[in-house]
Image (cartoon, helix red, strand yellow):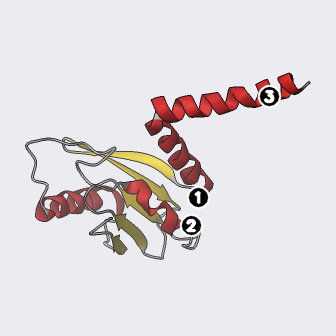
Amino acid sequence: MFLVAGGTLLVPILAFVASFLLWPAALINIYYWYWRRALGMQVKYSNYGNYKFCYVSRGKPGPKPSVLMLHGFSAHKDMWLSVVKFLPKNLHLVCVDMPGHQGTTRSALDDYSIYGQVKRIHQVLWFVWVREWRCHTALNLFYM
């Protein structure tokens, strides 16, 4: 009897250890997928020029301003999930992957300075999301 119970526990434990050692990125992606789903966030893509922007959003634009959340260098859109859980559910939230980060297009020829990033975000915002600029912005300039 103990052998069966021990074997039953051994299989999932070995599967977890193997995935942790062999595919740690898969576990991290599953973690972020779970929290996006739990918070009602959806991953979306928008094409603008030769860029494909990746972002997560919740809610729909309405009479209240939208909240745009931009991460800093070496972070990504999912870093905002711990903040999103404390924000009201009726807000329209957009967390963008900045150009050159995670799901958004990267190119060695583009300008990744602050001015270059602001220019591309401005263009895609004007084109896709907030044409009236009724938008609050949350910035994370330094992520440690």
- Characterize the local packing of mark 1: few (<14), some (14-19) or many (20 or more) Cα atoms within 10 angstroms: some
The residue nearer to you, when weighing 108 against 11, is 11
| Circle 3/circle 1 CB separation < 8 Å | no
Residue 78 numbered tag: none
Percent position of residue 114, x then y: 15, 64
Q: Amino acid at mark 3?
A: Gly
- Characterize the local packing of mark 3: few (<14), some (14-19) or many (20 or more) Cα atoms within 10 angstroms: few
The residue carrying mark 1 is: 39
- Vertically, is 63 above or below 31? below
The residue nearer to you, when weighing 90 against 56, is 56
**What is the secondary structure assignment of the residue under circle 2?**
loop
| Circle 2/circle 1 CB separation < 8 Å | yes
Percent position of residue 46, x then y: 33, 46
- For the point 15% across and 41% down, the residue is 107
The residue carrying mark 3 is: 6
- Vertically, is 114 above or below 108? below
Residue 85 numbered tag: 2
